Image: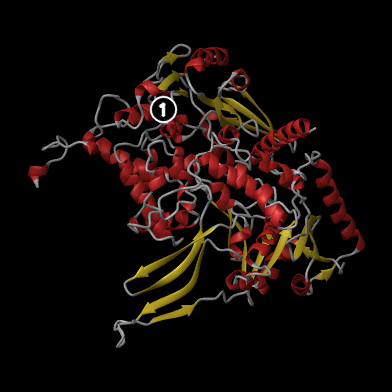
Amino acid sequence: MAELNELREAVAKVLPDVKHVIGWQRGYHAVRSSPLFIRNQEDLDKLIWDRTCYQNLASYLTSTRGERVGIIVKGCDSRSVNQLLQEQLINREDVVVIGVPCTGVISLDKIRAKFPINRVKDMQVEGDELTIATRDGEEHKLNRWDVAPDKCLACKYPNPLIFDTHVGEPIETWEPKQGLYARDEEFDQKSLDERFEFWRREMSRCIRCYACRNACPMCVCRDHCIAESRQPHYQSQEADVREKFFFQLIHAMHLAGRCTECGECERACPMDIPVLLFKTRMGKVVKDLFDYEAGVDQTAVPPLLTFQAEESNIEEKEW
Amino acid sequence: MSQARFLPYDAVTDWLRKIAETMRVTAPVREGNSVVFRDFDPEEPLVLGHQSAASPKSVVFPQLEYLFRYKTDRTADENGVRQITLEPIYPDEDVFVFGANPCGARGLTTLDPVFINDEYVDPYYKARRERSIIASIVCTLPGDACFCHWVGGNPNDPVGSDLVLTPIEGGYLVRAHSEKGEKLAAGLDKADAREEQAAQQVEDAVLATLDPPPDLTDCPDVMENVFDDMELWEQVSDKCIYCGACTYYCPTCYCFNITDEASGIAGERIRSWDSCMFPTYTREASGHNPRPTKAHRFRNRILHKFSYYPKLYNRVFSCTGCGRCIRMCPTTVDIRDAVLRVKEAATKDESAKEVSDG
């Protein structure tokens, strides 16, 4: 991974020309990072760059539209920036992109599945091994691949696809540990009843806080979301599984061919509901039908935002 | 204080099973990686001593509450008026909440003066409050985001709990803090002096692990000094993505919306959670929104909890320091930092004012 010092220097260079540069700082414990809005040297001193820098900061770009800001992106995050540019949801001249090659981050959710990560003393990293010491005197040794988010296991783009400043040398792209849609394929093995029961149980935990929606870099209706609209009255305020499921399906449909599969929705969910599954399912369909990946090519038009009389992968006349 | 009781760990399931014969029992279980309250099922292992994802607030203030059903007559009378029939829906069950955290239980007492006061009594809330019994377990593992002792609580705080259970060797020492609790615990064996002493040791040991808290007592008096300092509010809220997670998981947040969910000529009027972090929360019929940005909404959330509410209700903070808003926040916004930064800025303003006045 690129050196933190180099990253700090790159941010310092950009800082005079922008309102702020968005990066990461240490959260309230050693395994948790938190976004950092860098406005001055004092803020810059707080900047970190390590495997805890999971959050895709591109989610903030649409709300600062019209102001010039800097942003630090990993390879995967850069796809969201590309996609926002493709859809003209942000202006290229408003954003200074500082790209960092990334060798992978770690998922708090996956660590939490191993032990309740609530009393952290510190974390040591040596190669692929992480040692998390708790305040109770316990030491948990973890291999970082065991706690890597799925997007890292399937990573094809460790290097930023778009940047104004590149920090460090590009790294060699490695063979992904699994396909991006491995989880979907596993899920597809279940029977329809099992799948329905799975979602019924998972969605029953949802409390409609909309962390998934607001964390999504591509979810841009926000202040005019169908979930809260009264006129028209698309969704009721009832808290039953049907309404929650309904919202997720609408969200997934809106993101078909646009979702860069960054996993922010699932990472943000306080109830640990695997909501990314809805989006990767659509992503797989779009990949199969249109051979299209969102956010990879800045000049491309997303397939569902355009029209072709005859799609090459849809055999319309064979029916 | 009344006589303490003892509940052996291996007798918990049977005790709850017996209580479940007469009322709904809800207790924390694991689902995915989350600890959630669910209706008690003797077959399902309970997860006790850990903080649940959502607080037990929903027992008295559910996310969704049907207030009444309505139906409009198909035909009008001779004056062209159609009759509407209303059928109120009141809570009709007793609920025993087993295994809350003291911070979650304390949250219920911050809802009380809002829904039950001299001017107005909310019949739905009142009924649920009267029909619920809360047993909390002394918190022996305060987490990194916990700060109950900053805001008047502590890991063995009995406020809001009918029963407080302290984990000791072999079982829980059970202390009743209300008549309802007393009645429920009456069937349990009395605790002996050794057990009471062991519980005291557990409680003292947790208290000894807490760092000294900052003094927040002047927050209600000073924080509004910086009400208009939008630059400050923008900076403390910059990483917020204004989802409602902090407010929905908070044991003290009580904002709601009321909507009619109609189906043809009939429907229900429902009360459901709302959040001051949502843009629609303050949007007026004209389209004007007095809190147009997340900075405005964040300001409201902080000042409500640490200034407006304590000014209205006995200088108690509308925050129990449970840390859920920090832990559940997708972007790790830390309310502790926000409050300290605002207080610091506000106190600076205060001393500046004093100098200029002098």
Q: Amino acid at mark 1?
A: Cys
Image point (60%, 69%), residue name: B125
* As drawn, A110 above or below B114: above
Q: Secondary structure at mark 1?
A: helix
Query: Residue A64 appears at what percent x and percent y?
Result: 44, 31
Tell me the subunit letter for badge 1.
A
Query: Residue B119 appears at what percent x and percent y?
Result: 65, 69
Lateral position of residue A39 relative to residue A119, left or right: left
Query: Which colour scheme appears in the figure?
Result: secondary structure
Lateral position of residue A232 relative to residue A105, left or right: left
Query: Residue B115 appears at what percent x and percent y?
Result: 63, 66
Q: Quadrant of residue A301?
A: top left
* Label 1: how many Cα within 10 Å (few below 14, some 14–19, many 20+): many
* As drawn, B222 above or below A35: below
Query: Residue B153 appears at what percent x and percent y?
Result: 76, 51
Nearest to the observer: residue A75 or residue B170: A75
Q: Quadrant of residue B116?
A: bottom right
Image point (38%, 40%), residue name: A220
Image point (35%, 23%), residue name: A92
Nearest to the observer: residue B252 or residue B156: B252
Camera sees residue A51: no
Residue placed under numbered mark 1 in the picture: A76
Q: In this view, which residue lies farthest toward the right?
A: B193
